[in-house]
Image: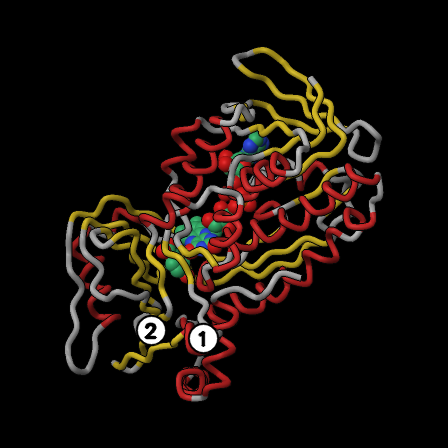
Amino acid sequence: MKTEVGIIGAGPAGLALAHLLQRDGIGCVVLEAQARQHIEERVRAGVLEQGTVDLLNELGLGERMMKQGLMHYGVELRFLGRGHRIDFADLTGGKGVMIYAQHEVIKDLVAARLKTGGEIIFEAKDVAVSGLDSEIPTIRFSQNGIGEELQCDFIAGCDGFHGICRDSIPAGVLKPYERVYPFGWLGILAQAPPASHELIYANHERGFALMSMRSPKISRLYLQCKPEEDLNEWADERIWDELDQRFAMRDGFSLMRGAVLQKGVTGMRSFVVEPMQFGRMFLAGDSAHIVPPTGAKGLNLAVADVRVLAAGFKEFYASRKRDLLGRYSEICLRRVWKVQRFSWWMTSLLHKFESDGEFDRRRQMAELDYVTSSRAGMTTLAENYVGLPME
Ligand code: FAD
Ligand code: PHB
């Protein structure tokens, strides 16, 4: 088998890249280790930046999102029992974010690709890459027990943090940068109407909590926990009681409770490798970088990477020039580091750090006070949250 671009991974990065290439008339094959149903049900991100929303619409993939997604023009920061709204529309010239589940985006992208005859090979096993610095990089994999080989002009490593692409680059080429946080998030999806129509990020002395949603009837809630928290110790009642304490307001507040549909613990890390390319393989999305979820940026950053990559491929197939492809990593990393900074900052602003003393707690409250009372402070948060402009 032969193709122009072999894409490994059918997450937001791989699928968005496939659609961008299809639009530009460039051939590609997508290989995914999991079954279609698995990737269409995996509960993950929920916040799409304005730029991500615009891109999905431009590609003709936004119909269901525009009907079922919820546009939000602000968030609440809650601390010391009081709520403070950050008004995105006012601070950013009318921008906002779309609340629409990542697995719904995946469903839309998979359906549209298959409908137009595009290929996605699900349940591809033993995926391995070779010849990355040759003219014909190759992907080997097996499907239904039969070994296959896919020769490509280029490979896009869109296989997430635990994929094989990053580790296939020879030792010493990539420089990793990493910070692991001393806490995780315990997340639930609940059959309960959200208690507020916008997201609430709460800094409480018991730890961080976040109220998000998937629809007017389904809430998505998170609370800061130990990195290896044992879910068995968290009966539903205990989760709701803890959330109620962390969201408590001076003048009263309570969440609406309902059946817990899904429960999980996520670790928190910041991670980047430089450069994001080697020979004819390009890393995009979580395979090259991870952000802690506090800034709601992971999916959006994955989509931003593949926009740059697709522009590079478009230039190459139009003119055989490799200027943009050669600068792929440099262009992406400028955004990646700004998003890393924002995600780290939101995480430090909102979480309880066990190592912190009284001084740090006071400093954190002063920063929250500043960020919610100075127009400059609020604008910094708002313009990063809705998404920095693409270069
Ligand atoms: P992935 O989505 O991980 O996709 C990689 C794909 O590659 C997967 O389908 C995987 O099965 C496949 N794969 C792996 N190995 C192989 C292999 N060897 N061969 C073939 N295929 C392979 N981001 C936001 O923007 N906003 C949010 O609100 C947000 N909230 C989050 C909340 C949680 C609890 C979590 C866990 C994450 C959140 N994120 C959020 C992050 C976001 O989900 C990720 O950044 C995003 O999925 C990255 O997309 P990707 O395509 O790079 O990687
Ligand atoms: C979510 O809805 O899953 C979500 C929202 C905001 C975040 C992280 C996750 O910062």
Residue contact between numbered discs 1 and 2, judged by CB atoms under 8 Å: no
Query: Where residue 76 is drawn, which disc sits there?
Result: 2
Q: Residue 158 versus residue 57: which sits nearer the camera? A: 57
Colouring convention used in this rendered image of the protein: secondary structure
Q: Quadrant of the N terminus?
A: top right
The picture places residue 326, in percent across and down from the top left corner, at 81, 49
Mark 1 residue element: helix
Q: Quadrant of ligand 2?
A: bottom left
| Total number of numbered discs in the rendering | 2
- In the image as oriented, which residue stretches furthest toward the top? 146
Query: Is the CB atom of the residue marked by disc 2 within 8 angstroms of ligand 2's nearest atom?
Result: no
Q: CA distance from mark 1 to mark 2?
A: 14 Å
Circle 2 packing at 10 Å, graded few (<14), some (14-19), many (20+), is many
The amino acid on which the numbered mark 2 sits, given as a three-letter code, is: Glu
Compared with residue 51, is residue 385 higher up or lower down, i.e. above or below?
below
Compared with residue 330, is residue 371 higher up or lower down, i.e. above or below?
below
Q: Residue 273 versus residue 22: which sits nearer the camera? A: 22
Decide if residue 57 is on the left or right side of residue 18.
left
Residue at image location 50% in from the left, 54% down from the top:
54
Decide if residue 319 is on the left or right side of residue 16.
right
The amino acid on which the numbered mark 1 sits, given as a three-letter code, is: Leu
The picture places residue 256, in percent across and down from the top left corner, at 15, 60
Residue at image location 40% in from the left, 57% down from the top:
98
- Asked which quadrant contains residue 342, the reply is bottom right
Mark 2 residue element: strand
Query: Where residue 349 is drawn, which disc sits there?
Result: 1
Compared with residue 380, is residue 198 higher up or lower down, i.e. above or below?
above
